[in-house]
């Protein structure tokens, strides 16, 4: 049991350093693994939400460099989607990671910061096209 000072010390130091390059949470889980899990869970959540318009949307699994094309979600039509879940919103320049396969592909960056809403970033031309198509359908 920790005394009062020990409890405060435990709360103040949420993570401890085991070596120069390896950090571990108090429960023994590496922070790198926690970050990967957080990112993968976010990708699954976004795939689930996008199934309203893309019923087969799912996480794109990348097993080697040949598969690595900056796309996190598969079966999303011409939309090439990269998902980023971090403590703070990622820089919009991360959209450059998305590699387009064909003309007409649209890169989209979906980002989420802790305690903030999910944002989608896409090129302005494509946003205008989406709005114009939406307006035509409602008219």
Image: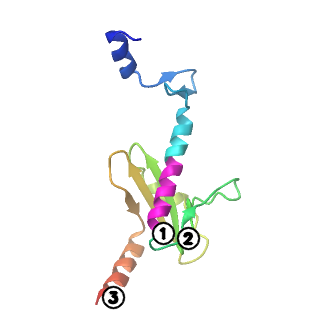
Name which residue lies at 38% across and 48% down. 113
Alpha carbon distance from label 2 to label 1 = 6 Å
Q: What stretch is highlighted in magenta?
A: 39-50
Alpha carbon distance from label 2 to label 3 = 27 Å
Give the main secondary structure of the magenta stretch: helix
Q: Which mark is residue 88?
A: none
**Is residue 48 magenta-colored?**
yes
Q: Provide the residue designation for mark 3.
A: 136
> Does 29 sit above or below residue 93?
above
Q: Where is residue 123 in the image (x, y as percent from the top left)?
A: 42, 68
Name which residue lies at 44% across and 59% down. 110
Q: Provide the residue designation for mark 1.
A: 51
Q: Quadrant of residue 125?
A: bottom left
Q: Residue 56 carries which label?
A: 2
Q: Mark 1 and mark 2 in contact (Cβ < 8 Å)?
A: yes
Name which residue lies at 49% across and 24% down. 26
Q: For the view shown, which residue lies furthest in the front direction?
A: 1
**Is residue 86 magenta-colored?**
no
Q: In which quarter of the image is residue 32?
A: top right
> Does 60 sit above or below residue 130?
above
Front position in the image: 107 or 15: 15
């Amino acid at each position: 049991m920790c005394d009062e000072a020990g409890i405060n010390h435990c709360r103040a130091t949420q993570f401890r350093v085991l070596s120069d390059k390896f950090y571990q949470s108090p429960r023994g889980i590496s922070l790198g693994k926690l970050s990967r899990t957080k990112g993968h869970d976010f990708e699954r959540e976004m795939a689930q939400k996008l199934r309203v318009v893309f019923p087969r949307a799912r996480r794109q699994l990348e097993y080697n460099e040949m598969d690595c094309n900056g796309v996190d979600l598969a079966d999303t039509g011409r939309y090439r989607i990269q998902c980023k879940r971090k403590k703070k919103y990622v820089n919009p320049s991360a959209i450059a990671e998305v590699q387009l396969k064909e003309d007409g592909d649209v890169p989209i960056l979906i980002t989420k910061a802790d305690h903030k809403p999910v944002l989608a970033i896409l090129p302005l031309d494509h946003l205008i096209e989406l709005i114009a198509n939406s307006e035509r359908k409602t008219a």
